[in-house]
Image (cartoon, helix red, strand yellow):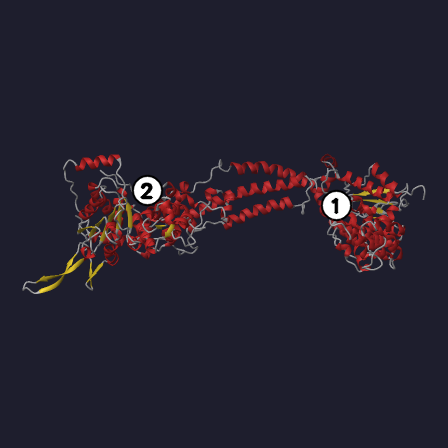
Amino acid sequence: MVTLPARGKRDLSRPIAVRNSRFRATPPATDWAALLTLLHGRALYLAPSALPRRAHAKDHAVAVELHQFRTRLHRQRAVLTTLRGLAAAAALAIILLVLRIRGTDLPLPTLPLAAAAGTFLAALCTVLWQRPSPGRMAHALDQRMNLREQIGSALEIEPSAGRMAALLHERAQGSLRTANLNFVLPWPSVRRERNALIVLALALVPCVLLAYHTPLPRHATAASPAHVARNGQHALARRGSRLHLAPIALRTLHNSTHNPVSVGGRHAGRVSIGSVSGAGRQTGTAGRSGNLGVRVAQGQGRIDASGARAGTLSGAAPASGGKSGLGANLHLAPGKNSSAGGVLSPAQQALMNLQSVVSNASNGQQGQSGSSPNSTLSSSPGTQGLNNPGTGSGQSGQGRQPSGQFGPNGPRGRGVGPGQRGAGAPYPGSAAGAPGQEGAAGADPEMNRFGRRAGGGATGPQSAPPQDSGNPSNPQLGTNSSIVLNGANGRSSRMVVSVGTPNRSLGQNSGSLYGGTNAPQVTVPGYVAPDSNVVTADERGLVQGYFSPPSGQ
Amino acid sequence: MEAPNEQPMTPERFGQLATDIQREVARSIVGQENVVRGVLTCLIAGGHALLEGVPGLGKTSMVRAFARVLDLKYGRIQFTPDLMPADVTGTTIIAEDEVGRRLLSFQEGPVFANLILADEINRATPKTQSALLEAMQEHTVTVGGSSRPLPRPFYVLATQNPVEMEGTYPLPEAQLDRFFYKLLITYPARGELATIVRQTVTGAEVSTRMVANGQVLMEMHQLALEVPMSTYVLDYAVRIILATQPGSGEATEMVRRYVRIGASPRGAQALTLAGRINALLNGRYNLSFDDVRAVAHDALRHRLTLNFEAETQGITTDQIIDEVLSRVLEMPR
């Protein structure tokens, strides 16, 4: 007797590859929608449907029967996506917070929170966008209930197409009515979602703690965590103060009544310029100096063209100081990334910079200091240029000729030396600014580790040499001079050395301007003060030694 | 016997009839369920089948069993190298009427039957083989300038021996393409062989009863045509056909390398119609991917012409079809 194959039984005589071909309908790797399985899981993934989106009427009987399945699947997706979105958001936030703790400069202080919120919102939007279509739902039910395209075919074919079509519809509706929702679309078990739950649990608590206690980058880099803890400042309060830094800096610029130039303040370096210009305004024409003032006077935009913010500052400084003839401003351009990580701590780095500055100034090697951090000192040539006109020429010849094209003798003139320029320029401020421009123009394209390109060697040969080399004398700082550290100027922390009593704007704690009238200022790149006017003995000694006139002069 | 037109053809009756037919044929043919099912599918589809197997496997017995069970007029043509087309289609002869007048009258050949067994069809010359072309496709025979319709339904079940190739004439592609199915008959299994021996050597005659007739078969055919077929399943079948054509962009690697001629549109027709019949046989009302895959080998294996490289490497069309089925996705990306 022959055994006939049972109805509905799969034909096992076919090769395995053929029998298993149903499982080839797994989502392809290139399907973008398949990526969403990361959010709602593979169990809730529906394979793409070849059915057009409007393959059926709204009141299609099968489509109506499919509604409950679609709704259920949508809810399941919503729950899982929300859960996994939360976990992803928490994980992302904690990663960003850890990065911030480690000193990574985040573009926004609220980036961790924003990223987490964005991730979560994206997940929610995905839920709304990923409402299963009837076609996909029909295909999924066909596969899960082993209906062999019964629902999909019934959804596409009108019951009026023939008696077989009517029978198909009837059977499809019966299948949908008798389907066990819990069997076809079971709720994902907690065990399956344990990974997401674990991530969420592990990430949420540290995330909150980190968000509450994470110091701002400058604090994190300027002081050890212990120091930060010692300060006892609340993270939110710090954040608030930080948020106020930039406006304060900008106000500082605007408060400079003699400085009509509105410096962008995009980076802290420009804020320093403002400070410089504030000092320079004492000299009259230098009031228009500063960053933009130099440009106007020289008709050269190369200061800004130098690209590096430090270079811009460098160019500005001499302009203001040059006219004043006071030589009061010695600007060490702050680099944007001065507080970025390095082997040395920022404070140590700043101190090293200062030591290098003094050393180079004493040795008259600023021209060679292009690649060294201390070359930033040379970026303030104007001041010294006036004070020591002839000293810079030698350095300018040290391979920095290209920069001479922006020399003071003309926009395209070949500079022979900052000192000469300073002296011979019809507009001292301009002349003084020229070296800065030159320095900027001739800047080494390679930024130094602090990102101070212009301060880095461009200006070195031209500007710095003069004053510094011949600057055993900066007699403005005497024993009665006060050294004020202002390290809270955002990213461009600086140390300001003031003569006399520093003026400090009320209510503007660390971001305020310093320096009294005619006060010399020193900005140490990379120095991040611990938010207080504290200077170590070493630093004080260095600065005082630098500014104190040598015995021979 | 089921009286035709007594009841309307429904899927349930369709399934019951199919089961009865297979059961009755199985009384004569032990085993070979897939072949019996394939032949039944051919008959329901109104197509012709090419049975290939070594001698002694019951090919002729199977055809005769179907003829009995379905109450079809049976005609047998033993193809030999000296067989002439007129021996198949018939010829015009001079005959005398009652009054002694001589008249030209057409003497119908064996092709004028419902079920033709073209035994060892590859032994006849291509000229004689081609005599069946018109009959298989048009269901007519043209002799002496006049066309004569063949009785409906008309089925040709041809057999051929795959091993004795000397003195044979392989069927041309045009004729192969006209076969709805090509079924491979394999050796019976151990238990089946024992049953065959037990049934045949005892002298007991196996009686089969008539289950249906030609009219019922045509009703079943009509019902199969009404089976819904969704566009995406149809698209799947079409892509399978395209994948067998070496010149198409859908061709698979093996097809490009080993296939000289791919499946024709007639293959797509056979694929979908056989799939729908397979769905009805399985009690379903729609064509599914599985139906297409289930009938792909029988419907396509004789429509692929392999090149010399494939023959030298022993590649078979079934391997090509396996590769095609494994490559073509149900839902295109």
Q: Which residue is mark 2?
A: A11
Residue A247 image point, x, y percent: 74, 50
Is residue A385 shown left or right of residue B98?
right
Q: For the residue labelled by badge 2, is the local secondary structure a helix, a strand or a loop?
A: loop
Q: Nearer the viewer, residue B147 or B69?
A: B147
Is residue A473 shown left or right of residue B251?
right
Residue B98 image point, x, y percent: 5, 63
At 40% from the left and 56% from the top, the residue drawn is A57
Q: For the residue labelled by badge 1, is the local secondary structure a helix, a strand or a loop?
A: loop
- Crowd rating for badge 1 (residues with CA inside 10 Å; few <14, some 14–19, many 20+): many
Residue B101, located in which quarter of the rendered image? bottom left
Locate the C terminus of chain A by quadrant.
Answer: top right
**Do we see residue A74 in this rendering?**
yes
Q: Which residue is mark 1?
A: A448
At 61% from the left and 42% from the top, the residue drawn is A93
Report how far apart the C-alphas of labels 2 and 1 lie in the structure: 73 Å
Q: Nearer the viewer, residue A180 or B239?
A: B239
Q: Is residue A185 above or below residue B100?
A: above
Three-letter amino acid code of the residue under disc 1:
Asn
Q: Nearer the viewer, residue A295 or A21?
A: A21
Q: Residue furthest front?
A: B167
Q: Which mark is residue A323?
A: none
**Do we see residue A148 in this rendering?**
no
Q: Residue furthest right?
A: A552
Mark positioned earlier in the residue sequence (2 or 1)? 2
Residue A552 image point, x, y percent: 94, 42
Is residue A207 shown left or right of residue A284?
left
Labelled pair 2, 1 in contact (Cβ < 8 Å): no
Locate the N terminus of chain A by quadrant.
Answer: top left
Q: Which-is-in-front pick, marks 2 and 1?
A: 1
Q: Is residue A207 above or below residue B92?
A: above
Chain letter of disc 2?
Answer: A
